[in-house]
Amino acid sequence: MKVLVGIVRIFVGILFIISGFIKLNDPVGFSYKLQEYFSPGVLDIPFLVPIALFLAVFLVVFELILGVMLIIGYKPKFTVWSLLLMILFFTFLTFYSAYFNKVTDCGCFGDAMPLTPWESFSKDVVLLIMIILLFVKRKYIQPLIPKWTLKWVIFVVFIGCLWFAYHVLMHLPAIDFRAYKEGVNIQEGMTVPEDAQEAIYNYAWTFDVNGKEVTKNTTGSYPNVDGTFLGVETTLLEEGYIAPIHDFSLEKNDEDYTDEILNEDKVLMVVAYNLSKSEAAGLRAITNTVKNAQAKGYRVIGLSASGEGDVQKLKSTYNFNFDFYFCDETAIKTIVRSNPGLVTLKKGTIQQKLHWNDAEDLNL
């Protein structure tokens, strides 16, 4: 039993460290996922939305430190209790999300390893079993290093986590796991291969046949039934191929400019998913960079999901003389974790992405 507890202890600890680090690398992205859980359609606790980023940082730092504490054997009673309560909460959350189809990706491993709700729930059930074992047999969790060093290891890890969180918040994630990372060609990312797997649906067709309701199930074709059609219910059986980039577009005045702009040789995109929430210091910081880009022949455009009123107010306040194009807010949040952020394109290929704090480092 001691050996089994030792193996499980290392496995669970490493898993918590990896999961915590991936989310700590992108706390803004994890905060978006928390906001999704807090929304009225899911847990209905919208009062937590304003502090979602704080909660995101707190949770991932706590998760990572618990993994380290478990491995080195620091405060085993507190550690296993914390792990048990945390996994119970997340098992309930992932089950709720999966059963009611509320959140399509739990965010457990960020964008590095997207999991479906049921995959996430299954993972949590396995973890729950392992953590229950650790909880029951916690007497076997002994320190792996001298006791006097345990608290200093945790202290160093804690300070390192806080520094890393601050760094990625003030700049951008150190590792970009998203579809819009530097070097990616957006047009290629939107392409669906000819032999791509198509989605498979079950269609439950309902007919009135001589006064009785009759249901026929097919995976596509309209059934040959001698009766009056009443309705159809569609259920997804198997998901088809989804292009890595599937929600990117550039629209202005109800016209699509996506292909035109993605074929430009030099483009600077000022990306701001919501202009009313854009940081004023950031908008001031990018002013000189925008002027320098225009002087060097770049086509400068704005990318936002905000309305025309917000756009005109922004252009008037900061004397921006470039056009703004509409794009889906979720896509914009995925492109760059900064509001505003800067992205340069060459024939649709992402050359550089920067937080507004690093605007002066843009290579033009």
Image (spheres, rainbow, N blue to C red):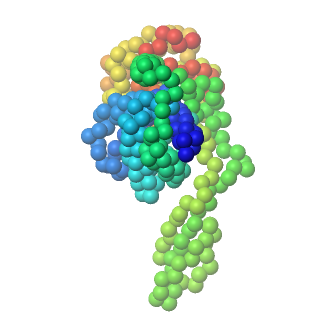
- Please tell me which residue lies in front, 108 or 349: 108
Picture quadrant where residue 180 is located: top right
Asked if residue 182 shows in the view, the reply is: yes
| Looking at the image, residue 154 lies above or below residue 201 | above
Residue sitting at 37 percent across and 36 percent down? 78
The residue furthest right is 195
* Count of marks overlaid on the render: 0
Quarter of the image where the C terminus is located: top right
Residue sitting at 45 percent across and 19 percent down? 149
| Relative side of 312 to 143, left or right | left
Image coordinates of residue 101 in percent, x first then y, are 45, 55
- Please tell me which residue lies in front, 11 or 186: 11
Image coordinates of residue 331 in percent, x first then y, are 49, 36
The residue furthest bottom is 210
- Please tell me which residue lies in front, 158 or 26: 158
- Please tell me which residue lies in front, 71 or 311: 71
Residue sitting at 58 percent across and 73 percent down? 217
| Looking at the image, residue 212 lies above or below residue 277 | below
Image coordinates of residue 354 in percent, x first then y, are 50, 19
Picture quadrant where residue 218 is located: bottom right
Residue sitting at 44 percent across and 54 percent down? 95
The residue furthest left is 47
| Relative side of 110 to 219, left or right | left
Quarter of the image where the N terminus is located: top right
Asked if residue 36 shows in the view, the reply is: no
Image coordinates of residue 151 in percent, x first then y, are 41, 22
